[in-house]
Amino acid sequence: MDRGYGPSLPASLSQLLMAHPSSSAPARPLTVSAQQIRGLDLTPLACLRQLAPAELPQHFGSVSLHFSWPRSADDPRELSEIAELRIWSLYADASCPWLPLLLERSGGELTRHVAMLLPHAFHRNDGIRFAPESLELWMTHRLFVLDGWARSHGLNMRLGLGQMATVLGYELDPSFWDTLPEN
């Protein structure tokens, strides 16, 4: 049997692990215009970038990005196949490494964002399947970066990081956190 890319996760399990958006979370998706995409303009993320680190957990799983990109009705490409959207997403991800924690999860916003960043395949029955080595490298790097960033601000985001990993189909061994230095 061809396992495709990465482990799959039952929908019911991933829904149980979703962080519930807070009432102060943005009520609408953040719209990114074609001009902003072409100019690598992160203005749509300004409201998030201005938040204090301690405020970010209040927005876990509450943000969605709407790309206002001109496409013909017969364009068969997925958004992650459009080079300009991928470049903007890569830039946003590098500039705001905590962005994946804030992205909505149950509707696939987090998965779509990560598909902009990593090799993947789309399967009719299984949905997006990430290349396992790519997902492992990206996820491990993201866990290191965000855990260190959170700790430097006196925050513990390990539960949210674990939830993010699970939603993406990445099995995080609980002893992973024990391997990190205490400083």
Image (spheres, rainbow, N blue to C red):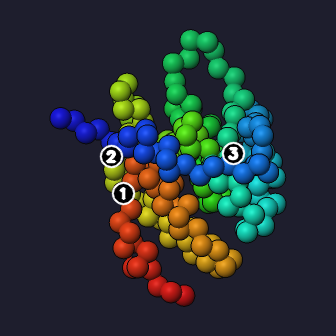
**Residue at 37% from the left image edge and 24% from the top image edge:** 124
Q: Is residue 117 visible?
A: no
For residue 143, above or below residue 183: above
Question: Do the CB atoms of the residues marked 1 and 3 lie less than 8 Å apart?
Answer: no
Q: Secondary structure at mark 3?
A: loop
Q: Secondary structure at mark 1?
A: loop
Q: Is residue 147 visible?
A: yes
> Counting residues from the N terminus, which is met first, the one under dot 2 or under dot 3?
2
> Counting residues from the N terminus, which is met first, the one under dot 1 or under dot 3?
3
> Counting residues from the N terminus, which is met first, the one under dot 2 or under dot 1?
2
Other-residue count near label 3 (Cα within 10 Å), few / some / many at <14 / 14–19 / ≥20: many
Q: Position of residue 100 (x, y in %)?
A: 59, 53
Other-residue count near label 2 (Cα within 10 Å), few / some / many at <14 / 14–19 / ≥20: some
Instruction: Return the mark for residue 148.
Output: none
Question: Do the CB atoms of the residues marked 2 and 3 lie less than 8 Å apart?
Answer: no
Callout 3 amino acid: Val
Callout 1 amino acid: Glu
Q: Quadrant of residue 125?
A: top left
Q: Position of residue 143 (x, y in %)?
A: 50, 66
Q: Which residue is mark 1?
A: 171
Q: Quadrant of residue 180?
A: bottom left
Of residue 138 and residue 143, the one placed in the foreground of this image is 143
Instruction: Return the mark for residue 7.
Output: 2
Q: Secondary structure at mark 2?
A: loop
Instruction: Return the mark for residue 63.
Output: 3
Q: CA distance from mark 1 to mark 3?
A: 24 Å
Q: Position of residue 22 (x, y in %)?
A: 72, 51
Callout 2 amino acid: Pro
Name the residue at the top extreme: 74
**Residue at 46% from the left image edge and 45% from the top image edge:** 14
